[in-house]
Image (spheres, helix red, strand yellow):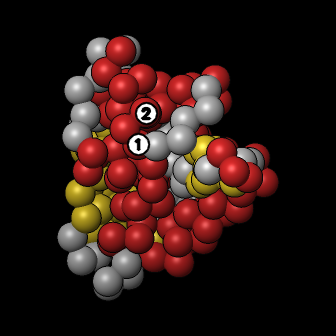
Amino acid sequence: MKERALRLKAIKKIIRDNRIRSQEGLLGHLQQQGYSVTQATLSRDLKLLKVGKISEGANGYYYTLPGEEEQRDSERNYVQDFQRGYVSLEFSGNLAVVRTLNGHADSVAIALDNLGLEDILGTVAGDDTVIAVLRQGIDGPALISRLKLKIPDLEEEQ
């Protein structure tokens, strides 16, 4: 997951610093920086980052990152998805176990993956349970305090 996070940061920097007109061009920049990535993976990365294209008239299109307002809207949607399915949260070692309403584990896991919490290495969703793997040294109270920065009315047990 660490390589993916670094690759996503590299993609954002490349798009900010250059006029990238195609995935092939972006792949070239990534390869120059030492990233070996397939076209399919790059497509998923661009979708995850919500990269769009802006017209440059006769010169075609170039990639652009979403604005701050779009990012805030996206984060609000993830918070709502989390709250809609969340039931409770418990910890065991470096694992967080999130109980959800039946059928909501996927949307809660996606929300956790996309809320920008670097304390969470990744999630696995079942039907009504999400397992989140926490970084070494992160305990329950630390994760809860960081979650509350994104979701102020979070309750450990409901």
Residue 10 seen in the current view: yes
Closest to the observer, 142 or 45: 45
Closest to the observer, 139 or 64: 64
Indicate the amino acid at tag 2: Leu
Badge 1 is on which residue? Answer: 23
Q: Which residue is drawn at 35% across and 32% down?
A: 27
Q: Which residue is drawn at 53% across and 71% down?
A: 81
Q: In this view, does 137 lie to the left or right of 129?
A: right
Where 8 sits versus 97, above or below? above
Contact check, label 2 and label 1, Cβ < 8 Å: yes
Q: Where is residue 73 in the image (x, y as percent from the top left)?
A: 71, 62
Residue 136 seen in the current view: no
Indicate the amino acid at tag 1: Gln
Q: Which residue is drawn at 55% across and 54% down?
A: 50
Q: Position of residue 124 (x, y in %)?
A: 23, 57
Q: How many marks?
A: 2
Q: Position of residue 108 (x, y in %)?
A: 42, 66
Q: In this view, does 2 lie to the left or right of 46?
A: left
Q: Where is residue 46 in the image (x, y as percent from the top left)?
A: 45, 48
Tag of residue 26: 2
Q: In this view, does 53 lie to the left or right of 110?
A: right
Numbered disc 2: secondary structure = helix
